Image: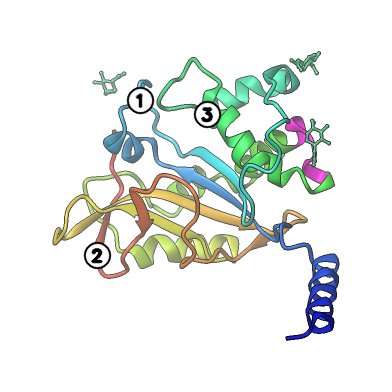
Amino acid sequence: MSLRCHLLLCLAAVSAFAMSPPHMWTKLILTHHWPNTFCSIESCHHPNISYWTLHGFWPDKGNLCNASWHFNSSEIEDLLPDMERSWPDLLKPASSGFWKYEWYKHGTCAAKAPALNSQHKYFGKALELYHKVDLDSMLRKFDIIPSANYYKLSQIEGVIENFYGVTPKIQCVHPAENTDVQVLGQIEICFSPDFSLLDCEKEISSAGASAFSVCDPDVLVYYPPL
Ligand SMILES: *[C@@H]1O[C@H](CO)[C@@H](O)[C@H](O)[C@H]1NC(C)=O
Ligand SMILES: *[C@@H]1O[C@H](CO)[C@@H](O)[C@H](O)[C@H]1NC(C)=O
Ligand SMILES: *[C@@H]1O[C@H](CO)[C@@H](O)[C@H](O)[C@H]1NC(C)=O
C-alpha cells in the first residue's frame, strides 16, 4: 500500500470522527435494583428497604471520561436527602463512595451533553427521571408485588411495556444451575439524549454487578419480599 493510500484512509477516518464522535453516547440507562436481591449476593449494611432504588444512570458509551472532575457532595447538597432515600449506598450507607464511583465512571461521560454537564444536573436529572418512572407504584398498581408466589417474566415485562410503551431490560440473579427459579434483581429503563423513553437493548451487557444477567423467559421469577 502506498503512502498516498494511507493518507486517504487517515483523512477518511478523521472526517468520520468529526461527523459522529465515536465517544458520544446515544442512550441513557436508568438502572433500578431491588435491594433485597442485591443484598442476597452482597454484604449490605443497610436497614431493610422495600422499594426499588437507583443503581445508576449510565450513558451507553464511555467509562471514566474525566478523572480530574472530582465528585463534590457540596454541589448536590440540596439533593442529598433524596439521594439518601432514592440512591442509597446499600454497602456503606454513611458514605458517599457509591455516588463518587458512579460520577467518575458514568457521570463524567454523561456530562458531555450540555444538559448533564454538572454534578447537580447529572444527579438531579437521574432523580427526576427515577421519580417520573416511579417503578414501585407502577408495579404495585398492576399487582406485581414482592411475594412468595412466582411470576412469569412475560407478566412483569408486559406490565412495564404496556405502561411506559418501551421495552425494559430486566435482570435476574440465577442462584444455581438447573434451578427452576430466578430472582428479580434489576430493571433498566432507557432514555434518549433528550430524556424521552426509549427501548432498552436486552442483549448488550451493561456495566454493573456481574451477578445480574438478563432474566430467562422460560424460568419463573421470584420477587422476594423482605
Ligand atoms: C428487617 O425487617 C424485618 C421485618 O420487619 C425485621 O425482623 C428485621 O430485624 C429487619 N432487619 C434490619 C436489619 O433492620
Ligand atoms: C475535566 O474536568 C475538569 C474539571 O471540571 C475541566 O476543567 C476539564 O475541562 C474537563 N476536561 C474535559 C476534557 O472535559
Ligand atoms: C465543592 O463545591 C463547593 C460548592 O460548589 C465549592 O465551594 C468547593 O470549593 C468545592 N470543593 C472542592 C474541593 O472543589
The residue labelled by disc 3 is 98
The C terminus - image quarter: top left
Quadrant for ligand 1? Answer: top left
Q: Percent from the top left, x then y, of residue 141?
A: 47, 50
Classify residue 165 by image quadrant. bottom right
What residue occupies the far front of the structure in this picture?
2
Is 129 in front, or is 206?
A: 206
Q: Residues within 10 Å of mark 2 (few under 14, many from 20)?
A: some
**20 relative position to 146: left or right:** right
Residue bounds of the magenta highlight: 115-121
Question: Element at badge 1?
Answer: loop
Is 84 in front, or is 17?
A: 17
The residue labelled by disc 1 is 48
Mark 3 beta carbon near ligand 3 (under 8 Å): no
Please name the amino acid that badge 1 sits on: Asn
Mark 1 beta carbon near ligand 1 (under 8 Å): yes
Residue at 17% x, 53% y is: 176
Q: Magenta span has 87?
A: no
Q: Magenta span has 116?
A: yes
Question: Element at badge 3?
Answer: helix
| First in sequence: mark 3 vs mark 1 | 1
Q: Residues within 10 Å of mark 3 (few under 14, many from 20)?
A: some
Please name the amino acid that badge 2 sits on: Val
Residue at 25% x, 55% y is: 182
Q: Is residue 24 above or below residue 93?
A: below
